[in-house]
Image (cartoon, grey):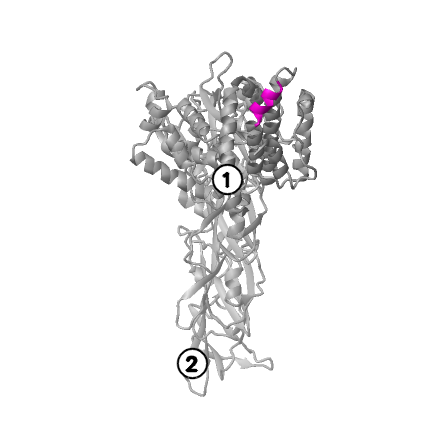
Amino acid sequence: MSAKVAIQKFSFPFSCAARLPQPDELTQKGCVQNKAFALHDLQENPIISEPNLVAVVGALVQDENRVHESQKGHPMGGMAAAQVLDCAEASLSAVVCRRSVFEKLTVENEDQRPAAKRQLSSESAARTITVVKKSAVRKDVEEQRHLKLKPHLGQRVSSAATGKRRCRKDLFANSEVFHRVDSHAIRAGAELKEKCVYDVKTIAQSITQGARNELERIRAIWVWLCHNIEYDVSGYLGHSEKVSSPEEVIATGRGVCCGYSNLCTEMCREVGIDCQEVPGHSKGIGYRQGQSLKNVNSDHLWNAVLLGGQWFLLDACWGAGRVDMEHESFVKRFDDFYFLTDPEEFIDSHFPDEEKWQLLDGPITLEEFERRVFKTSTFFNMGLRLIQPHQAHIVTDDGEANVSLGFSRPATFTYEITQHQDLLHCGASEQKESNNSSYGLLTVSHRNMKLQLLPPASGVYDVKVFSRPETATTPLFWVCSFTVECPTPRAMEEIPDNPFVSWGLQTAAGSLGVAGSSQGSEVAEVVDGVFELALKTSRPLMVLCELVHPELESAVSKRCVATQIQPNVLTCHVLCPLRGFYRLSVFVRDHEKADVKFQNAANFLLHCKGTVVSLDELFPPNLGSVCGPGTRTTEAGLTKFSHTTALLSTQQGKCNITFHNQRDLELHTVLSREENKTAAVPLSRHLFCTYTDTKVTVSVSLPDAGVYRLGLYARITPGGDFSPMCDFVLRNSCDQPCPPFPCVYSAWRKGCVLFEPRVGLLEPLSWVRFRVRVPGVQRVSIVGETRTDLKLNKSRVWEGEVFSGNGLQQLKLAAASGESSDMDVVMAFDIKQVD
């Protein structure tokens, strides 16, 4: 087929057919014009296929000798055919670039193309080989043209290019699109390894079989390298001879960075991918924090590949795993981040010797690279961003240094601060949640993490920050590092350890049902030794609190906290008996799910530096976790409490608590205080309950000043045990003792009301007026030395006066329900004894 026929045949879809230039038109200008003409047609008619254009180029090559012979003696005759070929091949390159713009090298688009259209015809394939051979003969011309076609500093070749560099996400949405390619490369690699195949060409062709474009071919090579080659730690440390040649690296399955990069280059060459080795510095194994790299030979090699007319960076050595210097071993861990990494992220850990390989619009200097904060792949994979500081080395200000990271998705954080070590890659790259946090305050808010570092002494410290997604159950992984120099430490009190690391609400608090807090993540200053925390909840919760002080005993700390549980708010009352810092940790679970474990929802740092609470003023022992009216009392039908808070204070030693018993439950009350406090009369005599209709009144008359616990219980199911409803904390500041109530017996039941006397200790030799309501009885009497019957008035109240006598110990109030002479004792009144 002649060139003219080929052009006419394959340019049918074009708006106007391409014309073979005449010999006198084959000037440099003419070549450029024909390139522009071809590109114009391509832009107007993007449906032209690569095999068709290859056929045109093949036809031009076959006519080369004929054209050359016919132009002997012509001034431009020696250049005509070559220039035609140059123009045609340049057009072919433009077509490839143009097609990459439409396809964006995505696997999805490739899948939508029919298989037949992705195959070259035998004729086109043969002519493609012919072009390659003739290009090889004219090596010098080809090299010059190749340099012109290669993009400089990441710019695309296509005439339709806008100049905007494509990112990794423009090539593929996520690594899942490579599942087929990755699986084949790993499986084929294992089969070749089992057969002891070490030939670069054979391996490259085998693992890329089925790859549909350049992107999939380089992916297959990179995945094979990461899964089949281990870092040669022994060779790096000088314990054995380093392996460098591609065949040796494959055979031994190990190599240092140059082994990875050399092999990557060779394999790419075998499958037609333009790949370059890039030497430079890296913040990898052996990198010393703060060291100057000026006048120091570079120690690392990685690769750059040309895809769709643009250079991309990759490092199979870092993608294969990490080196554990502590155990001098290689830890295999496939890291997809280092495949076609964006230059803006790659530059934080890799600095090339040649500035052009930074692939940045604004290249940085070596000094700036040294100052940059080291960020691991986890940092970028989690979408973190550095707010402060902007350099890796920090000098404390008044003994304090601050680190802040931003995030878009909820995350968990922790940190590690240790004495400075030279090597950056020391210690584990993952961290457990528990950690000594005495040297810093880590707080996590809705969109950022703040770390306030407080080194304990002068010196230089290494700080590692660890993180993971909030919902993940994996260990926390290293995300970035800093060096903190502390000239003068801040004089301060000891901060209690925080095993939950961060201060304030945990990032998972919302999912646990905690919607907000009255206290932020900053240190809370405690006034007069008393602190109150309120947590807003989105659903009914149960809560437990833990208060920790470096010098506070556990038994005492339990008497420092009282919690009230209400449907939409949790309240925690805290007392501080010592000066210094306290950790208040809050744990919650759903109210109905008794079988679910409590989970940490918040941690607060409290600072008490003024007045403290004395030990006598702490909450009473055996205080329940549910104080004051709330969710539990509401569910039991106990409502309309006269006192809605858990803490009650009285200056007279007396108080009444009223509420409604909607379900007519059987109730029981208990009054208690510190066990070492003794009283002449049992504390049960200082409580008196009156139950009328649905209203219940609990009257309290306290014997001494101090703090008391009033426990309210109810029998929820008939015949069942009494269940705790809530506790009240009663604080009495009255020094004068209040008298006890009468002793009540079982006949005192619902509807009974005592009007007079309201005390259970009567004066001797005095007349006492009695007024009492006892429904459903026929007779009420006061029994002493004699029996005195009370009279029923118009208000259905039994009343009368009785003489207390001399030497008499008790007066009993009794009632008879019928005409029978048998009477039930309702209550008893004691009489003071005269010496």
Residue nearer the viewer, 520 or 549: 520
Of 674 and 815, the residue lying toward us: 674
**Earlier sequence position, callout 2 versus callout 1:** 1
199 inside magenta stretch: no
Q: Amino acid at mark 2?
A: Met
Q: Report x, y in % for residue 467.
A: 48, 37
Residue position marked by numbered label 2 in the rendering: 823
Q: Main secondary structure of the magenta part?
A: helix
Residue 561 at x, y = what percent? 48, 48
- Which residue occupies the foreground of this view, 762 or 835? 762
Q: Is residue 568 above or below residue 792?
A: above
Q: Residue at x 49, y 59 (%)?
A: 726
Image quadrant where residue 797 sits? bottom right
Q: Under tag 1, what secondary structure?
A: loop
Estimate how packed mark 1 is, as few (under 14), some (14 to 19) or many (20 or more) residues with alpha carbons within 10 Å. some
What stretch of residues is rendered in magenta? 63-71
Q: For the residue labelled by badge 2, is the local secondary structure a helix, a strand or a loop?
A: loop
Above-or-below relation of 276 to 446? above
Check disc 1 and report the residue beneath it.
121
Residue 65 shown in magenta: yes
For image coordinates 44% across by 38% down, the residue present is: 476
Judge from the rendering whether residue 824 lies leftward or rightward of residue 800; answer left or right. Answer: left
Q: Of the residues shown, which amino acid type is indicated by label 1?
A: Ser
